[in-house]
Image (tube, coloured by chain):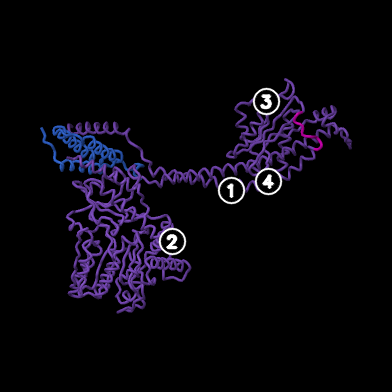
């Protein structure tokens, strides 16, 4: 049973997710990661039960892990042509 | 293997999450797509304009010919008449149209008229009606539904310029191959450049003419003519009608060609106009610039301002039209560039009300100007024990050069702290100005606190003890009227990029006797008079301090920016910004958990239109990032080049929103609502 994360940890998770989003070479996934993070944090803001908060935090941490690994995998196969949204 | 499959599973999960959220994506108007569309519409507009010109010139060529050819068939009409109502059995409709398209609706009108004529029953059920078609367009339209009725069709008439022999051959062709009682020629008669009437001319066959003449009626008078020579009346009539046909055809073809060109002219003109309207609409969309899918709200004007189109045009004009080095050449381009450059200097001088333009020295920016004063005046006028008075709210560029000078000369830097209303303590400053003070370095408007210092009082105190005053006017010159003579400042620095001018240029104002006594700062070309191997003599002001090729285009851009601001009126700008500043301060301080730095605005205290603030529990960088990415609001976070001030206030960094005269209350409202949303978001991280 995980303990409730402190405010610092939550903030740190948010910032890490945004920084990991920057590393994606694909414009769509980058924007998606940023959007999804903000939406998820907004959605979970009202949670008060410590167990729920801890569960959401753990979920966020695992997603951070996924994002970090996927950033590396995607960069291996980065297309040379930039998306039109980035011009 | 297992690691690979783990990756794959995560990959798929990630992709699924992506797809599920992708339909929620709001496609922002991509400025790239709009820019492309604008380029293509502009090209189309160029093409249609060119086509209009070509059509106009072709029209001029044929118009006289067409009008002259009208005289050809008029005697025939007088003699043989134009009688469309005569009942005949075999009708032939000769439709004249153009080969090329894009000529308005004249071809469709001609085809419509031909079809109408075809449907009309000319007396009795045994009548038949055939088509003879001239021109590709009518052929294309009529071949669809009336293929069996088309007797003959000819295209590519206008390959060579139209002349009578060509038309005569055509007429011959038609007369030989087509059986007819009446020929009805459909063409667009050229009334004027904008009006083309579909007309029908009827030519009757000789037998019908004879029949009509005998029957009486309109052609009865024909009998009155005596026929001379050996030919019979019918032969003469045949020749006459054939000739009539060819003349009418000639005229009809010419009229149609004129109408074609005229119609093309108006069609191309209206499409150029449509393209122009489309471009206007696209430019409007493009200018409502979007950042991250939201309308951009630019609140970082204390860092740099946005430039009006006039300034960008001035820069481009310089580089395109009269790019040349100044003060060095005799030729026209150089003379023009020099004139514009010196005119810009004069404009700056007028803007701050200096007594003459040679008191203005162009530098790269205000920082370089302060360094100029430090290295040139400071190193030669300060000695051990002399004091330089500064405030802790100065910009780094007003502190660090004096630290160098202090190290080199042994002078002492003394700093004035803030008073209780978070403004540099003016009374303390007065006390500090003693006999030992040689220089007072003060900002006019603080870029963090938004406070305005009473420069005229500071200058009078300093001059009482014989000290000089350097005024850092970077945040004041763009926003209010600055008069160096009424302030009586010894030195004043400002940068162009904060006052709607280009980056890369700033200026130093110095009293001429002061600047003349200072040794040069940078050495090189332009600032010398004579150069020998072991020594050189220096040029007069202001060239003495402007070594090397200056930023000519940028100086001219600064001149244009000054014209732009003066046209609006600095007093008006100041009054508007005071209003905006109060509005921003009121709204910002009403947001809970926001702490604004600087004095509170009141009847005696005016703030500049900027607010540095901190939010309890949220880092300013987080605020700025969130505002930028989620709301398209651009503010600045950091120490704003005022670390000593932040240390005094007890913070590492702050966020700052700064306005200029082109910001509106709507921008402030946007900013406040976005800020509230940001604070709510981060506050939920409990």
Question: Residue B318, which numbered label?
Answer: 2
Tell me, by letter, which chain the rendering colours blue. A
The chain drawn in purple is: B
The vertical placement of B508 against B280, above or below, is: below
Q: Which residue is mark 1?
A: B53
Q: Is residue A35 in view?
A: yes
Indicate the secondary structure of the residue bearing disc 3: helix
- Residue B356 appears left or right of B401: right
Marks 3, 1 in one chain? yes
Residue range corresponding to the magenta coloring: B78-85
Work out how far the residue at label 4 is from the one at label 1, CA to CA, in angstroms.
15 Å
Numbered disc total? 4
Left or right: residue B166 versus residue B487 is right
The residue under label 3 is: B119
State yes or no: residue B81 in magenta.
yes
Badge 4 or badge 2: first in the primary sequence: 4
- The residue located at (22%, 62%) in the rendering is B424
Check residue A65 for magenta coloring: no
Quote the CA–CA distance across marks 4 and 2: 46 Å
Q: On the image, numbered disc 4 is attached to which residue? A: B63
């Amino acid at each position: 049973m995980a303990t409730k994360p402190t405010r610092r940890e939550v903030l740190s998770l948010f910032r890490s997710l945004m920084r990991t989003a920057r590393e994606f070479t694909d414009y769509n996934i980058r924007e998606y990661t940023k959007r999804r993070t903000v939406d998820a944090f907004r959605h979970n803001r009202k949670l008060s039960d410590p167990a729920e908060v801890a569960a959401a935090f753990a979920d966020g941490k695992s997603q951070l892990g996924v994002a970090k690994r996927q950033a590396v995998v995607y960069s291996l196969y980065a297309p040379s042509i930039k998306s039109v949204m980035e011009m | 293997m297992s690691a690979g499959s783990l990756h794959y599973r995560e990959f798929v999960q990630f992709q699924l999450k992506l797809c599920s959220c992708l339909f929620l994506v709001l496609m922002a108007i991509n400025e790239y797509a709009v820019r492309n569309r604008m380029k293509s519409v502009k090209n189309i507009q160029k093409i249609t304009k060119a086509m209009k010109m070509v059509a106009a010139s072709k029209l001029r060529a044929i118009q006289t010919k067409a009008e002259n050819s009208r005289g050809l068939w008029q005697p025939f009409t007088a003699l043989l008449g134009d009688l469309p109502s005569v009942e005949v059995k075999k009708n032939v409709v000769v439709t004249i149209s153009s080969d090329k398209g894009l000529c308005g609706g004249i071809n469709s009108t001609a085809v419509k008229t031909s079809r109408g004529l075809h449907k009309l029953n000319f007396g009795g059920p045994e009548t038949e009606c055939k088509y003879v078609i001239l021109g590709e367009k009518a052929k294309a339209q009529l071949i669809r539904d009336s293929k069996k009725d088309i007797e003959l069709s000819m295209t590519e008439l206008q390959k060579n310029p139209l002349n009578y022999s060509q038309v005569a051959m055509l007429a011959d062709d038609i007369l030989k191959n087509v059986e007819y009682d009446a020929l009805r020629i459909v063409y667009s008669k050229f009334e004027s450049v904008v009006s083309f009437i579909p007309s029908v001319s009827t030519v009757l066959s000789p037998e019908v003419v004879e029949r009509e003449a005998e029957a009486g009626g309109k052609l009865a008078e024909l009998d009155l003519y005596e026929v001379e020579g050996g030919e019979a009346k019918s032969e003469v009539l045949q020749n006459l009608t054939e000739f009539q046909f060819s003349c009418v055809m000639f005229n009809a073809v010419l009229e149609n060609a004129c109408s074609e060109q005229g119609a093309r002219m108006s069609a191309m003109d209206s499409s150029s106009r449509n393209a122009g309207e489309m471009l206007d609409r696209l430019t409007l969309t493009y200018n409502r610039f979007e950042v991250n899918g939201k309308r951009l709200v630019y609140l970082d004007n204390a860092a740099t301002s946005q430039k009006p189109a006039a300034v960008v045009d001035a820069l481009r004009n310089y580089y395109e039209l009269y790019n040349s080095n100044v003060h060095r050449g005799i030729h026209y381009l150089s003379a023009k560039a020099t004139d514009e450059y010196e005119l810009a200097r004069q404009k700056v001088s007028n803007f701050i009300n200096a007594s003459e333009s040679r008191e203005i020295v162009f530098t790269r920016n205000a920082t370089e100007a302060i360094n100029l004063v430090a290295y040139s005046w400071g190193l030669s006028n300060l000695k051990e024990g002399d004091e330089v008075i500064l405030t802790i709210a100065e910009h780094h560029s007003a502190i660090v050069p004096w630290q160098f000078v202090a190290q080199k000369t042994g002078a002492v830097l003394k700093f004035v702290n803030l008073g209780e209303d978070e403004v540099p303590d003016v009374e303390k400053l007065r006390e500090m100005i003693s006999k030992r003070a040689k220089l007072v370095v003060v900002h006019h408007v603080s870029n963090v606190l938004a406070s305005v210092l009473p420069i005229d009082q500071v200058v009078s105190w300093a001059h009482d003890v014989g000290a000089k005053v350097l005024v850092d006017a970077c945040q004041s010159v763009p926003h209010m009227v600055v008069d160096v003579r009424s302030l009586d400042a010894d030195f004043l620095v400002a940068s162009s990029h904060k006052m709607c001018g280009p980056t890369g240029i700033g200026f130093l104002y110095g009293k001429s006797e002061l600047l003349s006594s200072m040794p040069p700062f940078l050495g090189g070309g332009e600032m010398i008079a004579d150069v020998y191997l072991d020594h050189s003599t220096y040029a007069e002001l202001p060239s003495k301090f402007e070594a090397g090729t200056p930023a000519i285009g940028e100086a001219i851009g600064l001149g244009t920016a000054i014209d732009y601001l003066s046209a609006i009126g600095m007093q008006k700008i100041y009054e508007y910004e005071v209003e905006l500043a109060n509005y921003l301060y009121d709204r910002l301080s009403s947001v809970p958990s926001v702490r604004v730095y600087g004095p509170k605005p009141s009847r005696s205290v005016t703030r500049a239109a900027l607010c540095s603030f901190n939010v309890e529990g949220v880092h300013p960088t987080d605020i700025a990032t969130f505002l930028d990415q989620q709301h398209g609001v651009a503010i600045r976070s950091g120490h704003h080049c005022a670390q000593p001030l932040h240390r005094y206030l007890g913070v590492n960094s702050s966020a700052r929103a700064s306005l200029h005269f082109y910001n509106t209350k709507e921008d402030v409202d946007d900013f406040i609502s976005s800020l509230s949303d940001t604070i709510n978001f981060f506050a939920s991280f409990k």
